[in-house]
Structures are given as structure tokens and as C-alpha cells.
Image (cartoon, rainbow, N blue to C red):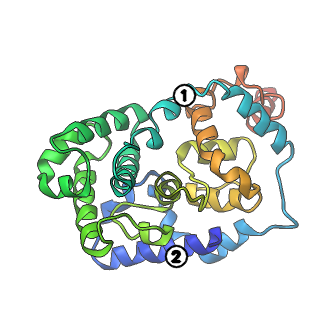
Amino acid sequence: MSGKRAFRTCQKAVVAKKIKGSNTADKHFEADSIKGNNTIKDTDIEDLAQNDDIWRPVNWEKTLSNIKEMRETRNAPVDTMGCDKCVDYNTKPEIMRFQALVSLMLSSQTKDEVTFAAMDRLKTYKTGLSIESILEISEEALGQLIHPVGFWRRKAKYIKQTAELLKDKFSGDIPKTVELLCTLPGVGPKMAHICMKTAWGVVSGIGVDTHVHRISNRIGWVKTPTKTPEQTRIALESWIPRDLWEEVNNLLVGFGQQTCKPVKPLCDTCANQAICPYVQGKKGSKKN
């Protein structure tokens, strides 16, 4: 499925959830849905996805190579406590997949360290973390176990609802497509694409969180500035070779955690400072 088609299908799923009476606060759950990405028009997506003879950023290969060198040690929080590090690969496959989904639901607007600790508590609580154990635990007790992840009360509710749906509609396993994952409470495109890779080993798209969104705009990897992570995903998938999609999320998230930070990025130590539009823009502003 193409990125554009998957996005539209996810949009329909989001609309369907709203029609069923989802609280308006739901838009705050997934980080890439905070500022209204659900209102993007098809024409906007078509504009973003225009190939224009495969537009690619200047120096993108050098920029990527430099980021890989800076990330060579792989010692950022995402490398040791990211979603793929939160699951038990020795358990039953369907339980592992459910754990991957839960870890992503917990990770929204939450540091990897906090998510990892919450997942550890869930996996070591009584019978462990599975659909059955979530069905048995009360929403209040679940909330206490995952606290202090961001929006922990809402996430406890969504995880309980998701366990019910998976039992009743998906034969006790998680969905195997992006569009079906997006029908679950609080799950948006970013979570769905990362879950597809971690749980099913399928690269369905680029997982774009706030780090990837911010960095892509700073280093000029989008043809025009994007306002939401989902817009950024569509833009990136329009030119990044598909064989690189799998590594983009981890590379840029770790880079964002260690170097290209949201506040006070370490531009002076960045190997891309000579070719980074963000750095050059700051220098130009100082001259003026």
C-alpha cells in the first residue's frame, strides 16, 4: 500500500472513531495528532507527495552519512529503551506483538526511560503483560502501574479498550495492517507504522514522531515546511529510497535525543553544521 493510500485509510479510521463518540481530548493522545493533523486535506497530501521528477534535498546523502557516523555508538535512549527493547521476544508471538503495541501506546509524549520502566512493571506484574492480564486488571490498577507516563489515565482506558477489541474482533492478536491498527483507541499513523515493523517485521512506512518531524524541517528534508508529523511522513516517503525507510526513525530519534535537541541543539558539535539549513539560517540572522 502506498504511503498516500495508507494515510487516507487512517484518516477514515480516525473519522470513524470520532463518529462513534470519541472524546475530543483523544486528539491529544498520540504526539503526531496533537495539533490537528486529522484535518489535512487530500489536496495537501497530494501536493506533498508530488514527485516533481523525484525531488530530493541538496546534500541529503552527505547529511545522512554524517548522522550515521554521529550515531555510530548507538547509545541514545531509543537504542536501549525504545519500543523494540520493551518487548519479550521469548514469549508467544501474539503476546510479543501485543507488548509492542502497548509500548507504543505508552510512549506518546513520554521519554523512553519512563516508557521502558512502565513496560517493565507491566511485564513483571502477576502473570505478565498480555491481552488476558489486561482484561483482568482494573483500569485504576493499570493506571497506577503505568504512571507517570504522559496522559496515563487516558492511556489506561485506551489499553483496556484495545484489549477488549483484540479479543472480540481480532482473535486475540493485533491487526496486521496500518489501517486496522489505526482503528484502535489512541493509535495513529506513527504508532501504526512502527508497530508494523516491530510486531510483524513489515516496513509499511516511515515512523515520524516529534524528533523526526523537527529534524526533517531543520535539515531541509521537506520541500516546503510541514506542520505535522504526518505531513512530514508523506513528504519523506515521496523521495527517500524505500530501502532506507526502516532506519530513518531510529537514526533521527537518537540524533534528536543527543544532538539536534528541541531546545538548544548542539549545532557546534554537529557534523552537518556546514551544510545544515537551520545552522546557516541562524548565522544569517546574526549578520542581519
Callout 1 crowding tier (Cα within 10 Å): few <14, some 14–19, many ≥20: some
- Choose between 213 and 143: the one closer to the eye: 143
Q: Is residue 19 left or right of residue 254?
A: left
Residue at screen point 56% across, 34% down: 262
Q: Residue 20: x, y in percent?
A: 29, 78
Residue depicted at 73% across the width and 28% down the height? 69
Residue 11 x, y percent position in the rendering: 49, 73
Q: Name the N-terminal-most of marks 1 and 2.
A: 2
Query: Quick one: 203 or 261, which is closer to the camera?
Result: 203
The numbered disc on residue 280 is none
The image quadrant where one finds the C terminus is: top right
Q: Which structural element holds mark 2?
A: helix
In the rendered view, would you say 146 is above or below 272? Answer: below
| Mark 1 secondary-structure assignment | loop
Q: Amino acid at mark 2?
A: Thr
Residue at the disc numbered 2 = 9
Instruction: Read off the residue under disc 1.
Output: 76
Residue plotted at (36% across, 38% down): 115
Badge count? 2
